[in-house]
Image (cartoon, rainbow, N blue to C red):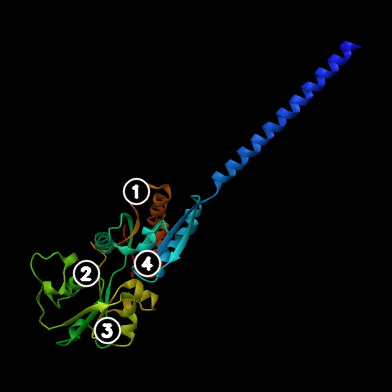
Amino acid sequence: MKKWLTALFTLALVLLLAACGGGATEEENNDSATNETATEEPKTLVVGASPTPHAEILEAAQPLLEEKGIELKIEEFNDYVLPNQALDSEDIDANYFQHIPYLEGQIADNGYKFVNAGGVHIEPIGIYSQRHKSLEDVPENATVLFSNSVADHGRVLALLEKEGLITLKDGVDKLNATTEDIAENPKNLEFKPDYVAELLPQIYNEDEGDLIVINSNFAIDNELNPLEDSIAIESGEGNPYVNVIAVRSGDEDREEIKALLEVLNSQEIKDFILEQYKGAVIPASK
């Protein structure tokens, strides 16, 4: 009888230990499944952008990034100052609104620890006029209105020189040229480089000057067609004013940033840019 009770007790103890052991294994399995689910959740990337064309291009890239497990969130900005401030304060992971000379100027002026992670597109600037159908019609003493962004001044002057309206001094760095670097101005043009860039389309519509120089993103945003409405426009070939993805130094090596650049330079996005903007916005790479 005693042996039978001992055997029964031993069997009960084994079953109890097995049950406890099984419960622990199940809990561990549940924890493992939870961790696996967490790692499968999409990574989030927040990019600040101008509404047109930058945010539109990013919207086209969203489904392509989603396929790579990255959720792209777009925060729109309507000026050229706040996107860099937001990047510096780590409110966003990257921004996409500025060309290389502007980025370099912002870094020099504000001490930002930013880097250019890669170029995406070019927005040719155009010369617009309500008063004249061509540059040949421009009279003496005509006014030329353009952005107060110093990074755009050399660009505007280089376009005016290309069109034969002025001549810059020999040896001048055209990226950084100012009106002080003009050697010849046969029509005695009056330059007014003191306008907020995003207001120039409105100034053009109100006919406040002979020639208004407008960046294509602001032209498009105000229902102007740079190819049809301008009387002169930049060429994309050899253009140094590539719009780039800017990030904090070191973040250019992040997996999400590399994936973003890969998508933005993909054939799908290049085709989108060419079809959507009809040459008013040009992919940075062929």
Label 1 – label 3 distance at C-alpha? 44 Å
Label drawn at residue 129: 3
Quadrant assignment for the C terminus: bottom left
Label 4 – label 2 distance at C-alpha? 23 Å
Quadrant assignment for the N terminus: top right
- Packing grade of label 4 (10 A; few <14, some 14-19, many >=20) is few
Earlier sequence position, callout 1 versus callout 4: 4
Please tell me whether mark 2 sits on a helix, a strand or a loop: helix
Discs 1/3, front: 1
- Which residue type does callout 2 highlight? Arg
Q: Position of residue 9 (x, y in %)?
A: 83, 19
Residue 283: image quadrant is: bottom left
Left or right for 104, reference 18: left
Label 3 – label 2 distance at C-alpha? 18 Å
Earlier sequence position, callout 3 versus callout 2: 3
Please tell me whether mark 1 sits on a helix, a strand or a loop: loop
To which residue does mark 4 refer?
Answer: 82
- Which residue type does callout 3 highlight? Ser
Q: How many marks?
A: 4
Please tell me whether mark 3 sits on a helix, a strand or a loop: loop
Earlier sequence position, callout 3 versus callout 4: 4
Give whichever of 140, 91 is nearer the camera: 91
Earlier sequence position, callout 4 versus callout 2: 4
